[in-house]
Amino acid sequence: MAAPGIAATKSIAEKGFIYGLPLVMNYGVLHAYAVDRNSGNYKAPFNQINNEARVYTYKDTSVPTPNSDTPYSILFMDSRAEPLAQPSAQVRQDNDMAPCTNRLAFRAEGD
């Protein structure tokens, strides 16, 4: 098998950057929030929820673009340790999405 040419190598590097960067950035936030107690951004250990009593500002550097009108609750779950149950709050009828910290959204019951 021949080595890839310059164009193919560039394409592979671009795809690796595009698909790999979000994983690396997410790991950086995970490490700052749940692992490194001296990071200045530490929130709580794994499997323990943290509710911020304030909204984020430009000074919160571990989040690239925080919403300045949204209070956050953060939970990093390590399901290797034990089974975890995550209860969810009742969602208003006029708002059928319940956002989660991992940037996924779950449909509200009944939809």
Image (tube, rainbow, N blue to C red):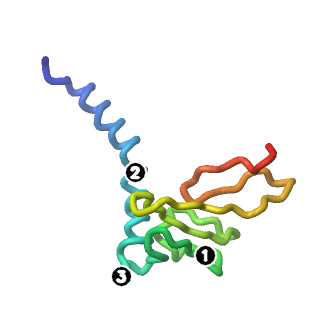
If the image is split into quadrants, where does the N terminus sit?
A: top left
The answer to whether residue 77 is above or below residue 5 is below
Label 3 sits on residue: 38
x%, y% of residue 26?
43, 57
Q: Which mark is residue 51?
A: 1
Residue at the top extreme of this rendering? 1
Q: Amino acid at mark 3?
A: Asn
N-term-proximal mark, 3 vs 1: 3
Task: Name the foreground residue: 5 vs 62.
Answer: 62
The answer to whether residue 85 is above or below residue 54 is above
Q: Amino acid at mark 2?
A: Leu
Task: Name the foreground residue: 17 vs 103.
Answer: 103
Q: CA distance from mark 3 to mark 1?
A: 19 Å
Q: Nearer the viewer, mark 3 or mark 1?
A: 1
Relative to 23, is 99 on the left or the right?
right
Q: Which mark is residue 23?
A: 2
Q: Secondary structure at mark 2?
A: helix
Q: CA distance from mark 1 to mark 2?
A: 24 Å
Q: Amino acid at mark 1?
A: Asn
If the image is split into quadrants, where does the C terminus sit?
A: top right
Q: Residue at x 78, y 50 (%)?
A: 96
Q: Residue at x 73, y 52 (%)?
A: 97
